[in-house]
Image: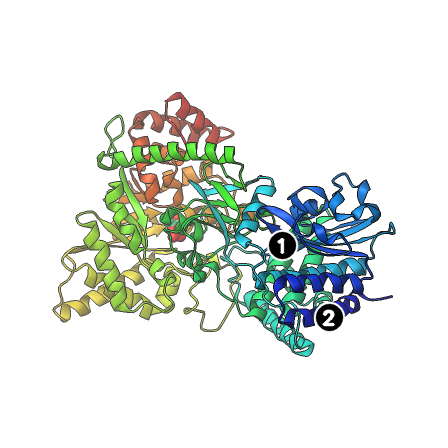
Amino acid sequence: MLTAAAAARTILTRLHEVMASRSHAQAKLNTVVQTIATSLDSEVCSVYLLREGMLELFATEGLAQEAVHVTRMAIGEGLVGTIAEQCGTLNLAEAASHPDFQYRPETGEDKFHSFAGVPIVRRERAVGVLCVQHVEPRRYEEVEIEALQTVAMVVSELIANAELVDEDEARSLAALSTDPERLTGLPLVKGLASGIAVFHQPRITIEHVVAEDTDAERQRVYSAFDRMREQIDKMASQAEFGAGGEHEEVLATYRMFAYDEGWSRRINEAIDSGLTAEAAIERVQQRTRMRMRQIDDPLLADRMHDLEDLANRLLRIVSGQLGTAASQGLRSDAILIARNLGPAELLEYDKRRLKGVILEEGSLTAHVVIVARAMGIPVLGRVRGLRGAVREGDHLLLDGDQGSATVRPAPAMVEAFEARFAKSRERQAGYAAMRDVEPFTRDGSRVTVMINAGLRDDLPLLGLTGADGIGLFRTEFQFLVSATLPARERQTRLYRDVLDSAGDRPVVFRTVDIGGDKVLPYLRHNDGEVEENPAMGWRALRVALDREGLMKSQARSLLEAAAGRTLNVMFPMVSEVWEFDAARAVFEAQLGWLRKQKKRLPDAIRYGVMLEVPALAEMLDQLAPKVSFLSIGTNDLTQFLFAADRSNPKLAERYDWLSPAILRFIKRVLAGTTGFPIDVTVCGEMGGRRLEALALIGLGIRRLSITPAAVGPIKELVRRIDVAEIGAAMNGWLAQPPPNMRAALTEWAIAHAIEID
Ligand code: PEP
Ligand code: MG
């Protein structure tokens, strides 16, 4: 029996000559259908292509020639329309018995019983249909269907070269012909967005399908496999895969596929049939996709995504198209689709063009999410099956408030969404009107509301929100967006610009907090050691104290930038008091040097620490006399208190910021600082959420540093609060925790006419 490879090879060899010939597109198509009909011993072979929204018979061998360019079907109409709509194959012994069958008398097809058709696909969309028919009622053999599918790839190349179909039209038609789908996930950054799906790792468009030299193609695939395996092994050894929150499970699956002999063998067989390396990879992938579609198993579907990832990686290597969507000129209404992203990867995108992000993974306090929040871009995370449901170019409505996204929405859905969008903009405008309003509680307590920042682009937000200052300037963001360690002059320039734009308002600079999920490719462990738990590893102040050059250069930059002003400097991840002493000593030494050089010095230096490692809370009596301020970093504090990695999507919804454990802890920290003249701020993401902020104010917190978008809503909240009332309620709940603190607080808020988010 003929193998699939041999059958396809015979046809491809013949088609290769047709493609290389100098005849025009229609003549080529005519020869293509004749060649396929002869090779498959088929009485009919026809090609339908999309034109003006309809599938038009473009060429046929066996049907009436008068029907060419006359017979037309809508997407979804008849067998041909069904194949295009579903982008699937049909193989029927008796065509007329199929419920979608439609008889077209002008074609003279009534004598043919059996029918097989496959879609002609371009950029993941059906742009036409290739079909064969026989008088004798029989189902086609698997090898024949496989050969047809391979040939459909060649026809796709032919029609692309001859521009026989309009791909944009195909895209919009495909969108129309596919039902809307609602995906749900975890709202990571609130907000609404309407835009077009762009894959962070774009799918490769295959330009050449038929190989000139099979040996050379085989060689290309061998070396691409070698490179891919190297990359996967490297990822495993660096443990920095994705945003640091990726799991070993995924990596293990990647490795399993990368080394799977069956996969590489099937690709080689496809090359044997006469395909190029790219077309062979895609061909095997198509076949796997089709098989998987018949198996309804979510676990297998997940594995299928892993294989898709890997096949795409292999395609990118083999075709040399290595960049992400960021390097390819982003469209102006993009909604980015990815499994996960690192903060540096997100920062490569132009934030004016990026309207939203949807991730298959992600968690509330992962740094990529913090960066997105700072950029004001809504993010939906934890969307299962995302990359299977969405295709490049699909219209998407992203609802970061309710945690859902609609793919290919119907016009009525778009209308309803636009109405909500307008309302939400109105609300935003209302919050913007709060800019000049001072946040006093009903009973007269002034709450300080500052912003978290880290990018030069954030600076105008201070003025726009009317915040009291920058309570956390994450200096590592400058390091994250640089390809190399930023020179001291560049650091100084940024810090000076920050101080200039803040004017009289205070700015708290946090020294670099790298490590964990903030990986700098140019700053690695000397010994190449891999960390099992980077979040609890060599990061933040630990790195800075070990790499003194880094800390010294930053200290000098900050001191010089703050000449003649007050410098507030804060150290992250302080775990023991001596670390604060050591960090401060680095600054003092630099200050001494500047003094000797007779340089202008800051008028005052205020030192502070982030309280995010629980151990430090036990040492407040020792620490408090030494510092001017404390800032509670609830993002890290929560992960350490609960021993729950903040980047691990599996734990994203497991622990609540409103748990009595965290609230009691914060209360104890406040009590531990009583009597010392120090400011205590909360600067984690928690403080930017209304219900959480209400609880914090109830605990006695009067200073919040939050994401800029939350300033309006939090100021508005503050003005509705009576400190004495919420303080009493919190005291009661902390002494005797209710079964669900969130529910209790929500009920309380509603009873006190306080809207929550
Ligand atoms: C925190 O840990 O709460 C914090 C504000 O710092 P970061 O999120 O940058 O670690
Ligand atoms: Mg932190």
Residue shown at 48% from the left, 61% from the top:
324
Q: Amino acid at mark 2?
A: Arg
Crowding near pointer 1: few (<14 within 10 Å), some, many (20+)?
Answer: some
Up the image or down, 328 lies above or below 689; here it is below
Q: Quadrant of residue 586?
A: bottom left
Q: As shown in the figure, which amino acid type bears the numbered disc 1?
A: His
Relative to 528, 67 lies left or right: right
Report crowding for label 2: few under 14, some 14 to 19, many 20 or more residues within 10 A (C-alpha). Answer: some
Residue in the foreground of this view, choosing between 497 and 85: 85
Question: For this view, does 420 lie left or right of residue 233?
Answer: left
Residue 614 point in image, percent of width and height = 42, 49
Q: Earlier in the sequence, mark 2 or mark 1?
A: 2
Q: Real-space Cα distance between discs 2 and 1? A: 35 Å
The residue to which callout 1 is attached is 305
440 vs 375: above or below: above
**Would residue 560 be found to the left or right of residue 661 on screen?**
left
In the rendered image, is residue 93 in sight? no
CB-based contact (under 8 Å), mark 2 and mark 1: no
Residue hosting label 2: 14
Q: Position of residue 109 (x, y in %)?
A: 79, 48
| Residue 618 drawn above or below residue 20 | above
Q: Nearer the viewer, mark 2 or mark 1?
A: 2
Query: Residue drawn 23% across and 67% down?
Result: 589
- Indicate the position of residue 413 as horizontal and vertical percent values: 51, 34
